[in-house]
Amino acid sequence: MSMKKVSLKTQYPVDTGEITINIVIGEGQLGSSVVFLDSTEIKRGDIRQLAIGKGQEIKGHKIFIKTVVSDINDKTNRTSVTYIIEGGKEKYQQTLEAIVEENGDVIRYYAEIELS
Amino acid sequence: MFKGNRLYFILPGLLFFFFTISQTTASALTIEDARTPTSPAFKLLDIAPSLIEKPQTPRQLGLNLLTAYDGNDIGIDFAPYWFFPHNELEFKQYYNPDFVQSIQQNLSVSLISANVSASQTTRALGVGIKTILVQGRPSKKLEGIKKDILVEQDKILDGEGDPDRLKELNLNFQEESKHREGFIVEVGCAIANNYPQNNWSNSQPLKNGFWLTPSFTRENIDFIGVFRRISDKALNQNYSDYGAKFCYHINNLFAASGEYLSRSISNAGNTQRYALILEYQLDKDRIITGSIGKDFDNTSFNPSNNPNMIAFLGLNWGFGDKPSIEIKN
């Protein structure tokens, strides 16, 4: 089985506050994520209100997020991942969506966020 | 030696019992018949459409409806909630929904269009809805599969893991998620009209129906209650059925159940059916079933004038009615 891949690359302007990340796996599907600050793993599993660090301390660094979503909902073949970043100059929210080709397939989501 | 001798007595006895006591009156109506159907509109017309579509999007539904009126029977069954994306609906909320969420995520609509006269001049149109008011809880087995999926996902995040193994687990999860435990309440209703000469202005009420099915499932206990009311406008009669079935799985091989079903027809009185059923699993394919009780009385419910005694002992070879026992791995 080949896994479809969906990617996001963006910038997030930080401020002086604490930067936090939320990842919402939608459509009632089951997913798991791992978050890196540059090459350091910060957390894996369910990502909620994950504090990355103070804006000025992590400015110029990059956040990498890998998420795997399984199609375990027999009512839909849609999958989605919503990235919510707060604590910077403004709230950032972006949803990526993908539809599995066959029941039970897996989608890989990648996000690369540059903290500017 | 003694065991062998004993077998000589038991086998003829069982055969005698099987051939002489297996007088059963096969009722047309069972508890399963009265539970909320998957597609209430199809059930109301008692027609299995030659073409059943399950559109996944509003656009697909529109296209299917456009092609429905080609003179053939067609049935469409769709879940409006899943026509649209739900990026905010997380796993936990979907598998443990509150009352409102349960209604909307389980709502299905069935539409049917069928010719009901031999001359193809009368069309019946029906619409029905079904949903689940209380959805119970996921089974323990499902929790186990979920943990296995998370472990496999974790491996794939690290560039390891087996995508095929993960897909297999995902499909297992989908299958097992259909078997929920705890208290579950299903409800459905449908209405159908006749259109003689295929003319909209000739609309005649045909039937309407309402179903309510509460059930409770725990490790070794199954309970199901049924209530169904069908109003047949063409015959000017109302049918009401209510009843319950309780099943206790004593162990993996032995189950005992009792059921009660009452039926009443307007202007024709009412009658009841009750039975005690014992099932013993001999091996993977064979189940010994014994039942005793009373069937519907000799009234218009039982027009073939069968006796109302239920007394049956037989061997189920894995076809026909679904037994209460399931071999567990």
Image: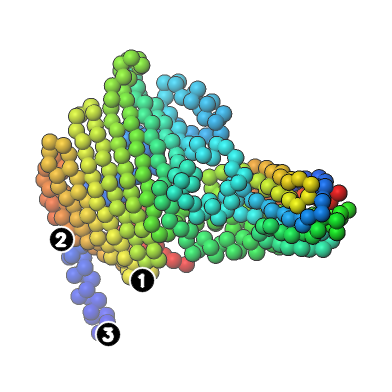
Q: Is residue B130 above or below residue B318?
A: above
Secondary structure category for the residue under label 3: loop
Where is residue A114? Give x, y as percent: 84, 50
Where is residue B116? Give x, y as percent: 32, 25
Camera-near label (1 vs 3) is 1
Residue B1, labelled with which disc?
A: 3
Q: Is residue B48 visible?
A: no
Q: Is residue A22 above or below residue B277?
A: above
Looking at the rendered image, the quarter that the N terminus of chain B falls into is bottom left
Could you tell which of marks 3 and 2 lies nearer the N-terminus?
3
Q: Is residue B112 above or below residue A15?
A: above
Using the image, name the chain to which the residue with label 1 belongs: B
Q: Is residue B312 left or right of residue B171?
A: left
Label 1 sits on residue: B251
Q: B298 or B315, which lies in front?
A: B298
What is the CA distance from the residue labelled 1 to the residue labelled 3?
30 Å
Q: Is residue B151 visible?
A: yes
Secondary structure category for the residue under label 1: loop
Q: Is residue B156 left or right of residue B189?
A: right
Residue B42 in which image quadrant: top left
- Name the residue type under label 3: Met
Using the image, name the chain to which the residue with label 3 belongs: B
Question: Would you say the residues marked 3 and 2 are in contact, meaning their CB atoms lie under 8 Å apart?
Answer: no
- Name the residue type under label 1: Asn
What is the CA distance from the residue labelled 1 to the residue labelled 2?
29 Å
Camera-near label (3 vs 2) is 2
Q: Residue at x 44, y 66 (%)?
A: B328
Label 2 sits on residue: B20
What is the CA distance from the residue labelled 3 to the residue labelled 2?
29 Å
